[in-house]
């Protein structure tokens, strides 16, 4: 093959996704001709190959799931599972190759390392350093916060200034300025109807990457709904519904590939932004701002600055990387300072210190000393699947009552919130006029529920709750918010109620996805109750 022919082949793979995917799967299966295998080694294809394998992996898992639900014979199902594992391994290897080639490319760039004192101070007290930077930028007449000039994102600020005069096309402005729900809908149309050529634009790429996960979650939601429809009918009547499941997996494969594409695009954008910010007049300006901000920091935090200086001087005396500026040492040094100089809690608008809504997460058990004797205390847990948005949840109370059910969730955090809400609502219904205390081992879920309870606003939890099922449960829970408290409990440490809730959550998930027969589920339920020592049967509900 001539150089021209090889170049054309590489260009074809870059432009034709189907051709690229067929080539990488052929190489994976050992049936790829040498000319194509050589073309696939080109560095420019490292990222697109990860996209092709991401798409192929979802389709491979979909083929396995269809075979399971169609009750195919063991041998074809075994081959499909083996193929899915092979694609997953190939995807992991492709991602490792991409990371290695990117690291090799970036290693050739000379990027100055900030002085050690600055990096340690910035990490030890980020709020104080950010305030010093804001004051410095303000005094220099530089924009503060718009367009994102503070220390948190100087590279973005430089890029915004570079692009300030660019005229955006109307479709790009529409994507940039629409609300989040409309943007996610645009991502779903991109996957299900027609590819949107404006998503990779520099002005939109970061937003695309941020919201691609939400769009992918809606793909998994469609798979869950299709699975439920298949499982609701007999084997004889499943054919048409299995076709609908295939369609859901096809859409989700595209969403997964586009999500990976968005990540590659934003990574490439950040590389260009940093390259622009670390050379020429912008690099000099940033260095001046940081040095001046450090001087301000030293004036406002003299005790901490003295510790920074003392610690860094002593560290340099024996650090093997001191000739390179100790590029990796600031995190451990800042950790030492954080222990010696704990950051005080910010005060609220009334001058009182804000109180934490959660216990220290290093505590072994949730603190229950202030809970009234009449309160009903229960532990909730949840389990999520790998394939679809189906989830299971379970709970167990100190009075011996238990419950479990299934729903759909975009994340483990959302599934845990569903478990908390379902347990609390069931206990409220069965225990009149007594407080209800729910314990959960998910920090994210406890924070989300407490935020909604304290604000009396269900939308306060919407960053965690994506689907209507969980949002509806939260709406119902807020009607009883004065009777409900939620606290964190360290999980999987042998706490009987936590282990029971976890077991019921797993059982609920297996029931929801059809991976356990009804008779086996009843036996498992009885075993869990025996282990708890409860004579009270579970309350099985679906959110």
Image (cartoon, rainbow, N blue to C red):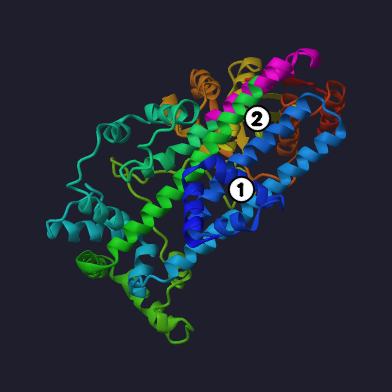
**Earlier-in-chain disc, 1 versus 2:** 1
Q: Which residue is mark 1?
A: 23
* Label 1 residue SS: helix
Residue range of the region highlighted in magenta in the rendering: 218-243
249 relative to 349, above or below:
above
Side of 89 relative to 287 (left or right): right
Measure the alpha-carbon separation of dots 1 and 2: 36 Å
Side of 156 relative to 219 (left or right): left
The local crowd at label 1, few if under 14, some if 14 to 19, many if 20 or more residues have their Cα within 10 Å, is many
Q: Which mark is residue 267?
A: none
Side of 354 relative to 255 (left or right): left
At which x and y percent is residue 270? 37, 55
Which residue is at the far bottom?
A: 317
487 relative to 297, above or below:
above
Secondary structure mostly seen in the magenta stretch: helix
- Looking at the rendered image, the quarter that the C terminus falls into is top right
* Label 2 residue SS: strand
- Which residue lies at the image location 45% right of the left edge and 66% below the top edge? 105
- Looking at the rendered image, the quarter that the N terminus falls into is bottom right
Q: Which residue is mark 2?
A: 391
- Judge by depth and name the residue closer to the eye, 86 or 215: 86
- Judge by depth and name the residue closer to the eye, 218 or 243: 243
At which x and y percent is residue 132? 24, 61
Side of 100 relative to 135 (left or right): right
Residue 526: in magenta span? no
Would you identify the image quadrant in which residue 416 lies?
Answer: top right
At which x and y percent is residue 355? 42, 43
Q: Is residue 408 visible?
A: no
């Amino acid at each position: 093959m001539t150089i021209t022919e090889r170049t054309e082949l590489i260009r074809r793979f870059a432009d034709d996704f189907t051709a690229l995917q067929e080539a990488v799967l052929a190489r994976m299966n050992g049936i790829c001709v040498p000319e194509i295998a050589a073309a696939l080694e080109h560095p420019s294809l490292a990222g697109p190959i990860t996209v092709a394998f991401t798409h192929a992996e979802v389709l491979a898992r979909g083929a396995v799931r269809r075979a399971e639900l169609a009750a195919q014979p063991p041998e074809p199902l075994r081959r499909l599972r083996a193929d899915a594992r092979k694609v997953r391994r190939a995807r992991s290897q492709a991602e490792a190759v991409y990371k290695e080639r990117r690291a090799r490319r970036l290693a050739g760039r000379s990027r100055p390392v900030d002085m050690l004192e600055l990096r340690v101070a910035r990490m030890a007290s980020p709020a104080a350093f950010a305030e010093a930077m804001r004051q410095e930028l303000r005094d220099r007449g530089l924009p503060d916060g718009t367009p994102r000039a503070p220390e948190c994102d100087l590279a973005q600020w430089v890029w915004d200034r570079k692009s300030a005069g660019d005229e955006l096309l109307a479709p790009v402005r529409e994507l940039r300025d629409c609300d989040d729900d409309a943007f996610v809908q645009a991502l779903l149309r991109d996957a299900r109807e027609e590819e949107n050529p404006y998503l990779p634009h520099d002005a939109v790429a970061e937003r695309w990457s941020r919201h691609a996960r939400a769009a992918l979650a809606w793909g998994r939601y469609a798979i869950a709904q299709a699975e439920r429809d298949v499982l609701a009918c007999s084997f004889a009547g499943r054919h048409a519904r299995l076709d609908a499941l295939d369609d859901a997996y096809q859409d989700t494969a595209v969403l997964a590939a586009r999500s990976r594409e968005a990540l590659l695009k934003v990574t490439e954008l950040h590389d260009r932004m940093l390259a622009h910010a670390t050379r020429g007049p912008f690099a000099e300006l940033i260095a001046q701002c940081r040095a001046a901000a450090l001087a301000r920091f030293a004036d406002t935090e003299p005790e901490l600055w003295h510790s920074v200086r003392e610690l860094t001087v002593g560290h340099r005396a024996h650090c093997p990387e001191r000739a390179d500026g100790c590029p990796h040492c600031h995190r451990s040094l800042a950790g030492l300072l954080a222990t010696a100089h704990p950051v005080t809690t910010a005060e609220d608008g009334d001058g009182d210190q804000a109180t934490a809504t959660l216990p220290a997460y290093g505590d072994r058990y949730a603190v229950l000393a202030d809970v009234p004797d009449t309160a009903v205390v229960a532990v909730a847990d949840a389990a999520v699947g790998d394939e679809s948005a189906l989830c299971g949840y379970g709970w167990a109370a100190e009075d011996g009552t238990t419950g479990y059910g299934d729903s759909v969730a975009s994340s483990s955090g959302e599934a845990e919130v569903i478990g908390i809400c379902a347990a609390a609502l069931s206990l409220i219904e069965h225990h009149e006029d007594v407080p209800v205390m729910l314990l959960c081992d998910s920090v994210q879920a406890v924070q989300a529920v407490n935020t909604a309870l304290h604000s009396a606003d269900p939308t306060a939890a919407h960053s965690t709750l994506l689907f209507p099922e969980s949002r509806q449960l939260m709406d119902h829970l807020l009607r009883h918010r004065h009777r409900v408290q939620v606290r964190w409990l360290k999980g999987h440490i042998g706490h009987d109620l936590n282990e029971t809730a976890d077991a019921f959550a797993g059982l609920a998930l297996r029931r929801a996805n059809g991976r356990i027969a009804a008779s086996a589920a009843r036996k498992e339920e009885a075993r869990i109750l025996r282990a708890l020592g409860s004579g009270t049967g579970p309350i099985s509900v679906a959110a």
